Amino acid sequence: EEPQAELGVRKIEPKIMRREPIPDVEWWDMPFLKEDMNGQKRAYTEVNVEKITPYVEHPIPIKITTEKEVAEAAMMHLTPKERKKLRRLKRQERTQEIRDKIRMGILQPPPPKVKMANLMRVLGDEAIADPSTVERKVRQQVEQRRKEHEQRNEARKLPAEERKAKKKQKWLAEGEPTTQVLVFKIKDLANKRHLFKIDMNAQQFHLTGCCVACPGVANIVIVEGGPRAVKRYKKLMIRRIKWTEDQKDDDDDDDDDEEEVTAPKLQDHCVLIWEGVVKTRNFKNWKVLHTKSEQEARKTLVDRGAEHYWEMLARFRDQRLDV
């Protein structure tokens, strides 16, 4: 003992937890017991039936904190090929499920799908006995299937207002943080068909911007919108509109007169000056403006905070001219 006292070592004694005596009645049973003669509730007293109701109290589940929460899986973006494969597999599962139910007798098998092509193979002797009646019945069945198919398609269609809103939402792309911009230089807008296509397609794609036509000076088209609408409009301006359709007859006459072989003419009827991304839109809607002078055309863009697009037009030089 003396060496232990010198080293400062103490004997560790276990702690004894004192437990309270078990009561005659637990606390959760107290409300359902009647009081005895002394005003106390004991285990041997009668049950107070008035306190018992048909309702069940469900305790709030306690969340276990020791288990690690499983992280939510990120949403996968499937390619068109993968979406088709997934759709095909789901359809096969549904078809197989129906076949299994038919085999087990849960569902009645559908009637044979008779067509004019498999008429003799399905009906056999019946078709030979009275071919006219059988043919009439088969044609009625085919027509009935066609009507049911069209009715199912109509039931799946969205109402006109919802379909219009869905199409508008597709072109607007309001969730995009930025806006894409295209600036075109048009050589001549005298053809009304070209101007109509420029105007109507911009409205249908829900683009904002303007088309400023200034004969003898310059013509500029500025469009702002979502990526899908801008991509479609760019294809319209560069590829779809035939800017030289009115000049074909004149060119044919000139080719007959000229015998010398010359280099092909540079196609500068519609040139993309600038394509980029901006944070905010400069235009609130789409409009076609006709001006008589450069000052008037510049003023229309200044009022909308887009004068820099006219400066781009003034400084623009086609790189193909340097080749």
Image (tube, rainbow, N blue to C red):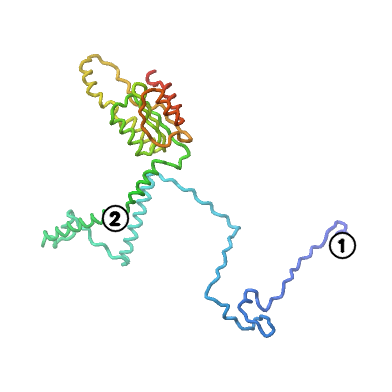
Q: Are marks 2 and 1 in contact (CB under 8 Å)?
A: no
Q: Amino acid at mark 2?
A: Arg
Q: Residue drawn 41% across and 41% down?
A: 172
Q: Is residue 170 above or below residue 180?
A: below
Residue 203 horizontal/vertical position (percent): 35, 38
Q: Residue furthest top?
A: 260
Q: Quadrant of residue 139?
A: bottom left
Q: Residue drawn 41% across and 34% down?
A: 224
Is residue 282 toward the left or the right of residue 257 in the image?
right
Residue holding disc 2: 152
Residue 194 horizontal/vertical position (percent): 30, 30
Looking at the image, is mark 2 or mark 1 nearer the viewer? Answer: 2
Residue holding disc 1: 1
> What's the CA distance linking mark 2 and mark 1?
97 Å
Q: Residue furthest bottom?
A: 37
For residue 295, the mark is none
Q: Is residue 172 above or below residue 118?
A: above
Is residue 193 toward the left or the right of residue 295 in the image?
left
Q: Residue drawn 56% across and 54% down?
A: 69
Front residue of 183 and 99? 183
Front residue of 297 and 150? 297
Task: Return the disc, 2 or 1, that comes first in the chain's sequence.
Answer: 1
Q: Amino acid at mark 1?
A: Glu
Q: Is residue 271 visible?
A: no
Q: Is residue 140 above or below residue 250?
A: below
Q: Quadrant of residue 319?
A: top left
Front residue of 57 and 113? 57
Q: Quadrant of the N terminus?
A: bottom right
Q: Residue drawn 33% across and 49% down?
A: 160
Front residue of 278 and 61? 278
Residue 34 horizontal/vertical position (percent): 63, 81
